[in-house]
């Protein structure tokens, strides 16, 4: 069997001497969709942010696409080109238009020509159904539109992996589905994705595997139906709250 | 002669002098502010270098050195009066370096150096007010630290700090008056020349006071317009998103 695309083993993260992530290990194969669920403060976002080194792990090993992230010789900027990230608060560049947000990273980081970058940008904008908003300023977009534009910005870099850090948590309920639909489309295309989310139905629906975090530990990491029928008391009580009225 | 007559007499007789003073004051304030801004941006950049764990030790050393140079520069120029700085630079150049320079050039240099220290702090607080998420997004796309600064942080930081930068420009209109100590022929100097022969001290200073007031009022008006233009859509939207995020935490 080939090497997994993401291989995390013994990952620990400390903030000011306090351990936030304890000894986390898991593997993600290419084209898998993995969701991390668990209560707030469990360390889900921190775990995701360690994978593109927005947080520097304290110890352990992370290997992505054959590159060891903990090796100080690894070119972090080069590595990040392969890993797209979508944030809870969208983080589109406020000084640029929608198109500018997607073209500038391509020309600056991948050194694509302006024409090529624009062509790619238009293609990805069409994918997230925002082609008619390409010349808008960021503050003219709704939250859902901003998040879709942010996804397009990440996709335009042709990443091998996409990280989603609570992509719908800052959205009005009405706008959640338009963003989730874009992620579902990516799943069909076979994009490898790691998603931190509180949308349980979505997570169980889309994921090949689900990781359950609590108090900084990865309590379970398994196929979605196995997690859903887990006999672990903590997971059961957590899921009960979500499976209630909805 | 009544005071009003003296006022009119001075204007009629010395208008070319006042006009020249006005021109020089405006030139000093504008040129000094622009040069100060460019220098100040460099100082702010030096001061805001972030040292990463992954940097080589030599890069760390360069960054730390640049940061401290910037801090020392800013503290010295903000902590001493412009008039004293002008005297020091002018006479140091003249007596120790053999510069036979005129006050105009020296005055412009000193004003620029002084403004740079203030504007560096303006730009720095503008940089600090840029949302951290903007920087994280840039880094996650593979931008280097420098690219992040140039394409994302600086454009937003400058926009954020336009009101304080314009305020420093207004200060420069007034503060350039102290440059008369190194015989720069700006407005204050024009008043002194006019009253040294006529002894119409009050009236001559009244004239330049009015001119200063008009200059600063115009600048303040521009400032108000710019502030209004900058604030409207941004502030509303940011407050809106902030509220939603809190609701979900």
Image (cartoon, coloured by chain):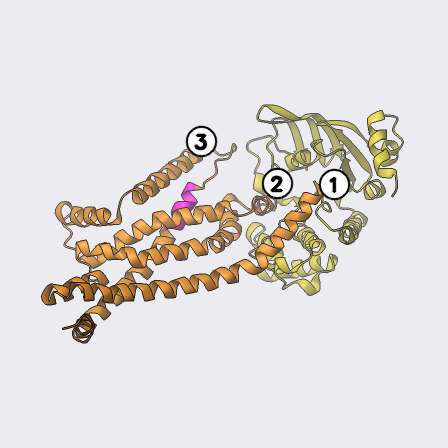
Question: Do discs 1 and 3 share a chain?
Answer: no
**Spot occupied by residue B18 in the image (x, y as percentages of width and height):** 22, 69
Q: Which chain is orange?
A: B
Residue hosting label 1? A195
- Residue stretch rendered in magenta on the structure: B40-47
Residue hosting label 2? A79
How packed mark 2 is, by other alpha carbons closer than 10 Å (few <14, some 14-19, many 20 or more), is: many
Classify residue A18 as left or right of residue B20: right
Q: Residue furthest left?
A: B197
Check the rendered structure and report the hue given to chain A: yellow
Q: Residue furthest front?
A: B2
- Residue at 74% across / 60% down in the picture? A129
Classify residue A219 as left or right of residue A100: right
- Residue at 16% across / 62% down in the picture? B192
Mark in the foreground, 1 or 2: 1
Q: Chain of mark 2?
A: A
Q: Earlier in the sequence, mark 1 or mark 2?
A: 2
Q: Chain of mark 1?
A: A
How packed mark 3 is, by other alpha carbons closer than 10 Å (few <14, some 14-19, many 20 or more), is: few
Compare residues B175 and A209 and report the one nearer the observer.
B175
Compare residues B195 and A51 and report the one nearer the observer.
B195
How packed mark 1 is, by other alpha carbons closer than 10 Å (few <14, some 14-19, many 20 or more), is: many
Q: Secondary structure at mark 3?
A: helix
Classify residue B125 as left or right of residue B179: right
């Amino acid at each position: 069997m080939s090497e997994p695309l993401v291989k995390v083993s013994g990952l620990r993260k400390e903030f000011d001497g306090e351990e936030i992530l304890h000894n986390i290990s898991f593997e993600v194969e290419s084209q898998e969709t993995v969701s991390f669920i668990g209560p707030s403060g469990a360390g889900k976002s921190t775990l995701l942010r360690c994978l593109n080194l927005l947080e520097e792990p304290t110890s352990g090993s992370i290997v992505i696409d054959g590159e060891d992230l903990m090796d100080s010789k690894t070119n972090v900027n080069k590595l990040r080109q392969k890993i797209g990230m979508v944030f809870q608060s969208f983080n589109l560049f406020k000084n640029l238009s929608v198109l500018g947000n997607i073209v500038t990273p391509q020309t600056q980081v991948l050194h694509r020509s302006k024409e090529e970058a624009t062509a790619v940008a238009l293609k990805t904008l069409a994918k997230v159904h925002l082609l008619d908003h390409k010349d808008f300023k960021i503050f003219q977009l709704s939250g859902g539109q901003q998040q879709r534009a942010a996804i397009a910005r990440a996709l335009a870099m042709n990443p091998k992996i996409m990280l989603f850090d609570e992509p719908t948590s800052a959205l009005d309920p009405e706008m959640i589905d338009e963003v989730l639909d874009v992620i579902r489309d990516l799943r069909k295309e076979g994009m490898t994705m790691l998603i931190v989310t509180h949308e349980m139905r979505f997570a169980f629906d889309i994921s090949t595997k689900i990781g359950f975090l609590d108090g900084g530990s990865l309590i379970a990491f398994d196929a979605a139906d196995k997690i859903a029928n887990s006999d672990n008391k903590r997971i059961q009580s957590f899921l009960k709250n979500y499976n209630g009225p909805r | 002669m009544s005071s009003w007559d003296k006022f009119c007499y001075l204007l009629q007789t010395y208008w070319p002098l006042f006009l020249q003073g006005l021109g020089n004051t405006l030139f000093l304030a504008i040129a000094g502010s622009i040069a100060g801004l460019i220098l100040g941006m460099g100082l702010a950049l030096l001061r805001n270098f972030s040292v990463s764990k992954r940097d080589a030790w030599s890069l760390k050393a360069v960054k730390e050195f640049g940061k401290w140079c910037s801090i020392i520069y800013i503290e010295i120029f903000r902590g001493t009066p412009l008039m004293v700085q002008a005297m020091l630079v002018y006479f140091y150049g003249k007596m120790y370096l053999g510069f036979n320079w005129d006050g105009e050039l020296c005055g412009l240099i000193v004003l620029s150096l002084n403004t740079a220290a203030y504007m560096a702090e303006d730009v720095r607080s503008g940089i600090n007010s840029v949302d951290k998420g903007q920087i994280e997004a840039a880094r996650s796309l593979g931008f280097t630290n420098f690219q992040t600064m140039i394409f994302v942080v600086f454009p937003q930081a400058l926009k954020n700090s336009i009101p304080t930068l314009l305020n420093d420009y207004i200060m420069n209109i007034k503060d350039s008056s102290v440059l008369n100590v190194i015989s720069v022929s700006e407005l204050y100097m024009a008043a002194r020349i006019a009253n040294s022969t006529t002894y119409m001290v009050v009236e001559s200073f009244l004239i330049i006071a009015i001119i200063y007031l008009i200059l600063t009022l115009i600048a303040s008006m521009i400032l108000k317009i710019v502030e209004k233009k900058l604030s409207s859509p941004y502030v509303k939207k940011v407050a809106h998103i902030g509220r939603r995020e809190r609701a979900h935490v």
